[in-house]
């Protein structure tokens, strides 16, 4: 098990404890209330996992990719070059904020910069 997986396990344990504590405090909660409480607590683990996994994507650091492996410009289809790393703050489907530090891509031909997906 790698370090990230150990951290996820610790987060799951904390969430399980928090959900159990919430349930003790809300013994008459209806199913929809329980579901919302569980989802709210699981969102904390979900956001960490999404952030960690996105950072592992091959486009997170374009300097490590050979030209033929680099993403293509959406305008002209040529391989892009790395244009430094920048932090991005994004919102997930569950209204959580993640922060990623990723390579920004640049197409010298079209002179456009973008963050490649993946």
Image (tube, rainbow, N blue to C red):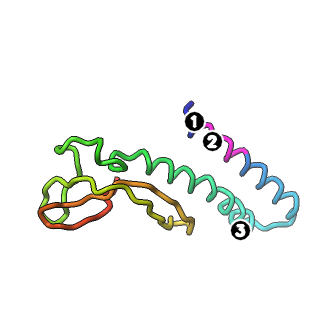
Q: Quadrant of the N terminus?
A: top right
Which element type, helix, strand or loop, lies under badge 3?
helix
The stretch of residues the image draws in magenta is 5-13
- Tell me if mark 1 has few (under 14), some (14-19) or many (20+) residues whose alpha carbon lies within 10 angstroms of its own: few
Left or right? Give the position of 22 relative to 45.
right
Mark sitting on residue 32: 3
Q: Earlier in the sequence, mark 3 or mark 2?
A: 2
Q: Position of residue 24 (x, y in %)?
A: 87, 57
Left or right: residue 89 versus residue 57 is: right
Residue 8: image location, x then y, percent: 61, 43
The residue located at (81%, 59%) in the rendering is: 22
Q: Name the residue carrying label 2.
A: 7
Q: Are marks 1 and 3 in contact (CB under 8 Å)?
A: no
Secondary structure at numbered mark 2: helix
**Does 31 sit above or below residue 69?**
below
For label 2, the crowd category at 10 Å Cα-Cα, with few meaning under 14, some 14 to 19 and many 20 or more, is some
**Residue 41, image x and y in percent?**
69, 58
Q: Are marks 1 and 2 in contact (CB under 8 Å)?
A: yes
The CA distance from mark 3 to mark 2 is 29 Å
In the displayed structure, does residue 70 sit left or right of residue 26?
left
Q: Secondary structure at mark 1?
A: helix
Q: Earlier in the sequence, mark 1 or mark 3?
A: 1
Q: Which residue is mark 1?
A: 3
Task: State how far apart marks 1 and 2 are (Cα).
Answer: 6 Å
The structure residue drawn at horizontal position 34% and vertical position 45%, both measured from the top left corner, is 58
**Residue in front for this viewpoint, 93 or 77:** 77
């Amino acid at each position: 098990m790698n370090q990230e997986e150990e951290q996820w396990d610790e987060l799951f344990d904390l969430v399980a404890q928090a959900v159990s504590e919430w349930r003790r405090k809300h013994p008459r909660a209806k199913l929809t209330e329980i579901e919302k409480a569980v989802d709210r607590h699981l969102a904390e683990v979900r956001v960490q996992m999404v952030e960690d996994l996105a950072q592992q994507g091959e486009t997170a650091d374009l300097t490590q990719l050979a030209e033929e492996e680099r993403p293509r410009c959406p305008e002209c289809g040529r391989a892009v070059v790395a244009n430094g790393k920048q932090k991005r703050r994004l919102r997930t489907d569950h209204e959580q904020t993640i922060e990623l530090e990723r390579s920004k891509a640049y197409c010298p031909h079209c002179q456009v910069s973008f963050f490649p997906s993946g």
